């Protein structure tokens, strides 16, 4: 074992073991350990789907480090390192916690032969749903749409699935709020048992914000009926927040510093007609989005059409320019967007990614040790038009 690995393992052994909402904030050095042993992978913030880390092939020392890092909510991003973005899903991947409805293996014709984790099928299906209905005034019921085209579950298992998404499992977001209908579809006894199980999960999980994500939904599920004493007890913890972290809380950025303009929608013919510099920038963004290398625009459009079960003509790519509000129409940055709200930021005219990616509408920085990029991402988030 390398000496630096041994040192890092000993350092991780000193981490606090508290879980749940009272867990202390993680120490800052975890970012350095994570970057040293689990660097960013090809695929950007979608790498945990398109280019996952093979945890079974890790050397013993790296496996031990990863298990320790995934036993706490260490406050750092893992999605672009090839692992699920939430700590609970990472623990199940490593075998540190028992899997559930999202980890079950099912078939999916869109993925070809074999069995696939339900979460991956669900993510693919909800991305397809969003592509088809995001900008339409009315949409089909999400659960009914999934049942018709992908898989069926009992009412109680649908309730578990939607609760997992409320808990942000695998970074998947549900369209609408199907949890409300799922609660109404089960019996009072089943609802009470569900609430009891998730009370245990909120108190025992390393995910420190789990109570804030799931707890209000559990309380609301009882409507006018009395809320069980156990639920009241768990949610009372909200009145006693954990100690404030030592770091200074960032001031919320107000919109107005940057403007997004020049929105252009491209099909394959439009991309192929671009100049060489812009076309190269597009190919870099397309490869980061898909996690695959595409030599030509047609290769990407063909891949995207297959992934979304549509024709090449049905694939749409958006391009935005970004400027300071004080110098409108003088672009400082460019943003390529795929599948409604996922993309990559570049400096204007440069084919090299800036290090900021958009993932499900949120701007994330791929290198946390770049404070100037963190600040820019905050300003972009405050002004983004989608």
Image (cartoon, rainbow, N blue to C red):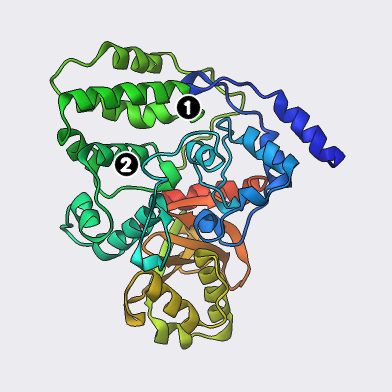
Q: Residues within 10 Å of mark 2 (few under 14, many from 20)?
A: many
Q: CA distance from mark 1 to mark 2?
A: 17 Å
Residue 246 drawn at (x, y percent)? 61, 23
**127 versus 161 height, above or below:** below
Quarter of the image with the C terminus in it: bottom left
Left or right of residue 62: residue 300: left
For marks 1 and 2 on the same chain, the one whose residue lies earlier in the sequence: 2
Residue drawn at 54 percent across, 38 percent down: 95
Task: Tell which of 194 and 15 is nearer to you.
Answer: 194
Task: Tell which of 235 and 352 is nearer to you.
Answer: 235
Task: Tell which of 280 and 255 is nearer to you.
Answer: 280
Residue position marked by numbered label 1 in the rendering:
205
**210 versus 133 height, above or below:** above
**Marks 1 and 2 in Cβ contact (< 8 Å):** no
Residue 157 drawn at (x, y percent)? 27, 39
Residue drawn at 54 percent across, 79 percent down: 278
Q: Can I make out residue 256 in this image?
A: no
Helix, strand or loop under label 2: helix
Residue drawn at 50 percent across, 64 percent down: 289
Q: Residue furthest left?
A: 224
Left or right of residue 238: residue 366: right
Quarter of the image with the N terminus in it: top right
Q: Residue furthest front?
A: 114
Q: Can I make out residue 167 in this image?
A: yes
Left or right of residue 38: residue 134: left
Residue drawn at 55 percent across, 48 percent down: 83
Helix, strand or loop under label 1: loop
Count of numbered tags: 2
Q: Residues within 10 Å of mark 1 (few under 14, many from 20)?
A: many
Location of residue 72 (image quadrant): top right
Residue 86 drawn at (x, y percent)? 49, 40
Residue position marked by numbered label 2 in the rendering:
161
């Amino acid at each position: 074992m390398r000496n630096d690995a041994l040192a890092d393992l000993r350092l991780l052994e000193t981490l606090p073991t508290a879980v749940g909402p009272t867990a202390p904030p993680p120490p800052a050095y975890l970012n350095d350990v994570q970057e040293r042993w689990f660097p960013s992978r090809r695929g950007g913030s979608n790498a945990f789907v398109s280019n996952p880390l093979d945890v079974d092939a890790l050397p013993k020392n790296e496996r031990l480090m990863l298990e320790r890092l995934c036993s706490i909510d260490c406050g750092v991003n893992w999605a672009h390192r090839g692992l699920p973005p939430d700590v609970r899903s990472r623990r199940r991947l490593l075998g540190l916690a028992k899997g559930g409805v999202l980890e079950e293996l099912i078939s999916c014709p869109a993925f070809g032969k074999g069995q696939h984790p339900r979460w991956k099928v669900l993510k693919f299906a909800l991305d397809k749903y969003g592509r088809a209905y995001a900008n339409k005034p009315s949409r089909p019921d999400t659960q009914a749409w999934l049942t018709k085209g992908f898989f069926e579950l009992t009412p109680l298992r649908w309730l578990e699935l939607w609760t997992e998404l409320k808990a942000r499992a695998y970074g998947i977001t549900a369209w609408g709020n199907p949890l409300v209908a799922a609660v109404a579809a089960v019996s009072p006894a089943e609802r009470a048992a569900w609430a009891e199980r998730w009370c245990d999960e909120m108190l025992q999980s390393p995910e420190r914000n789990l109570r804030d994500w799931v707890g209000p939904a559990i309380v609301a599920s009882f409507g006018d009926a009395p809320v069980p004493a156990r639920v009241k007890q768990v949610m009372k913890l909200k009145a006693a927040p954990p100690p404030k972290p030592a770091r200074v809380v960032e001031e919320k950025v107000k919109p107005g510093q940057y403007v997004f303009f020049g929105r252009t929608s491209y099909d394959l013919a439009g991309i192929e007609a671009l100049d060489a510099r812009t076309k190269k920038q597009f190919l870099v963004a397309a490869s980061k989005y898909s996690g695959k290398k595409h030599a030509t625009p047609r290769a990407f459009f063909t891949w995207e059409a297959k992934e979304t079960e549509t024709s090449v003509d049905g694939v749409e790519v958006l391009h935005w320019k970004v400027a300071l509000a004080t110098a409108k129409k003088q672009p400082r940055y460019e943003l390529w967007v795929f599948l409604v709200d996922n993309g990559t930021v570049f400096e204007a005219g440069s084919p090299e990614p800036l290090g900021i990616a958009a993932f499900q509408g949120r701007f994330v920085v791929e290198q946390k040790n770049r404070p100037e990029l963190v600040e820019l991402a905050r300003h972009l988030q405050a002004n983004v038009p989608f």
